[in-house]
Image (cartoon, rainbow, N blue to C red):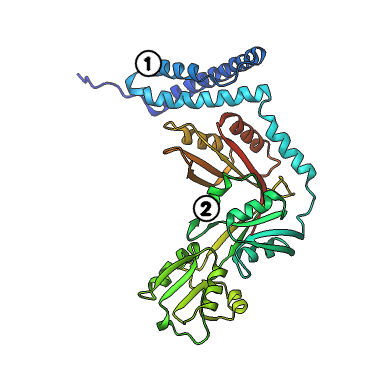
Amino acid sequence: MNDQPKIPSLDDSRAAIDRIDRELVRLFCERMGVSADVAAYKCAVGKPVTDAARERALLCKISELAGPEMEAHARTLYATILSISRAYQHERLNTASTLADKIEAAKQQTAPLFPARAKVACQGVEGAYSLKAAEKLFSCPEVSFYKTFDDVFAAIDSGECRYGVLPIENSTAGSVTQIYDLMSCHRFYIVRALRLKVDHCLLVKPGTKQAQIKEVVSHQQALSQCAGYIAGMGDVRVTPFPNTAKAAAFVKNADSNAVAAIASKECAAIYGLEVLCEDIQDNGNNYTRFICISKTPEIYPGADKTSIILTVPHKPGSLSRLLAQIDAMQINLTKLESRPIPGHDFEFLFYFDLESPIESPALLRLLGELESSSEKFRYLGTYREML
C-alpha cells in the first residue's frame, strides 16, 4: 500500500491560485471602498488621513493572525496596502491637488520656447566646463562667474541672475555630492538639463616635459575621472582645486614647470598653456550632466524628466515600498541618490529623477500621492534633458 501523500497537479494549484486571486481582488476593492467612507468621515470631523496609532495596532493584529511563518510577509503586504489606502484617501479628499495646480500654472506661465539670451550664473572662471554647458543651453548667455556653488544658488535666490548652471553628476566619477547637499538648502527649480561630453587635457607651461611634472591640480571630479592616467605618471602630488579653469590659471602663474593642470583644451588657449596630452580621462565616453536652475518653476514643451526630494519613514521596507509604488505607476526611475540629513543620525534625504511626460496623469497622481504621504517632500521641477 502506498502511504505517500498525493501531490496536487500544477494545473490544480494554479486553478486554486486563480480562485483565491479573484477573491483577493474583490476584497481589496471592497476594502478601498470602505477607505473612501473613512476619508469622508475624517473630512467631516476634521481628522487627518494618517492615523499612526491605528496603523501600528492594525499591523500588530495582522502579525498575530498570520502566525510566525507568514508574519513578516503579511506585515509587508499590509504596510503596502496601508500606503495605497492613504494615497487613495488623499485623492478622494482632493488634498493632493495643490502640486498638480502648481505644475499646471507653471506650464501656462512658461513661454513656448526656451530663452536664447539670459543672465546666467556659473561657478569658476573663464574656461570652466559650466561655461561650455551654458553656451550649449543658451545661444547667447550673459555669464557671471561665482566663487562657489553656494554662491550660484545665492545669485539665483537674490535675482542677480535668472538662471544658474551646475554640474550634478559624471558618468565616470559619479554624483557631485556637494550640489545634492546644497539642493536641500536652497529653493529653486530645475528648468533644463544637459549631458556634456567632457574631454580632459593635461596642460602645462610651454616647453614643459612630463618628467618635470611633480604636481597635478584640478577639480576633484576631473582628478577622479583621470585617476588611471595620473597613476601612470608616477610619483606626483595631486591637489584638488575649486574648478578646472582655476587650476589652469594657477599653472599659468606658477613659478616653475613642475605643476600641470587637468582642464579643457579651451583653457590652454585662454591661459597660454600647452596641451601635453589630450583625452586623458579613463573612460572615453565621459559625460557630465549639468542642470539649469531658476527661482520660479518653468515647464517647457517636451518636458519629460521630473526631479523630487523626499524622506521616507526610518523603518525597514519603507524605501522598497516607495519604489514598488513608482513601478506600479509604470514610471521609469532614472536616478536615486541618498544624502544624510544634517543633525539626524542614519536618516537620509532621497533624490529621485523620474522619466515621464509632464502630461501623464500617472505622473501627476504619483507626485500628489508622494507629496501627501511623505513627511518632507519637494518638487524640483519638470524639464527636458539635452544631449
Q: Is residue 12 visible?
A: no
Badge number at residue 205: none
* Residue 99 spot, x, y in % from top left: 68, 35
For mark 2, what is the residue?
Answer: 178
How far from the left and from the top, in percent, is residue 320? 47, 36
Amino acid type indicated by mark 1: Glu
Residue 376 vs residue 326, the one in the foreground: 376
Instruction: Using residue 192 as the reference point, say whether residue 258 is left or right of it.
Output: left
- Element marked by disc 1: helix
**Between residues 89 and 241, which one lies in front from this camera angle?**
241
Q: Quadrant of residue 59?
A: top left
Q: Is residue 150 left or right of residue 315?
A: right
* Residue located beneath label 1 in the image: 64
Determine the residue positioned at 70% across, 31% down: 98
Q: Is residue 170 left or right of residue 291?
A: left
Which kind of residue does numbered mark 2 sit on? Gln
Quadrant for the N terminus in the image: top left
Left or right, 1 with respect to 77, comes to left
Name which of mark 2 and mark 1 comes first in the sequence: 1
Q: Residue furthest bottom?
A: 207
Quarter location, residue 224:
bottom left
Residue drawn where x is 73% and y is 59% of the image: 119
Q: CA distance from mark 2 to mark 1?
A: 46 Å
Q: Nearer the viewer, mark 2 or mark 1?
A: 2
Q: Quadrant of residue 147?
A: bottom right
Residue 92: x and y, percent?
A: 66, 22
Residue 206 appears at what percent x and percent y? 53, 85
- Please determine whether, in this image, residue 66 is positioned above or below residue 379: above
Q: Nearer the viewer, residue 59 or 298?
A: 298
Query: Which residue is the extreme one toward the left?
Result: 1
* Quadrant, the C terminus: bottom right
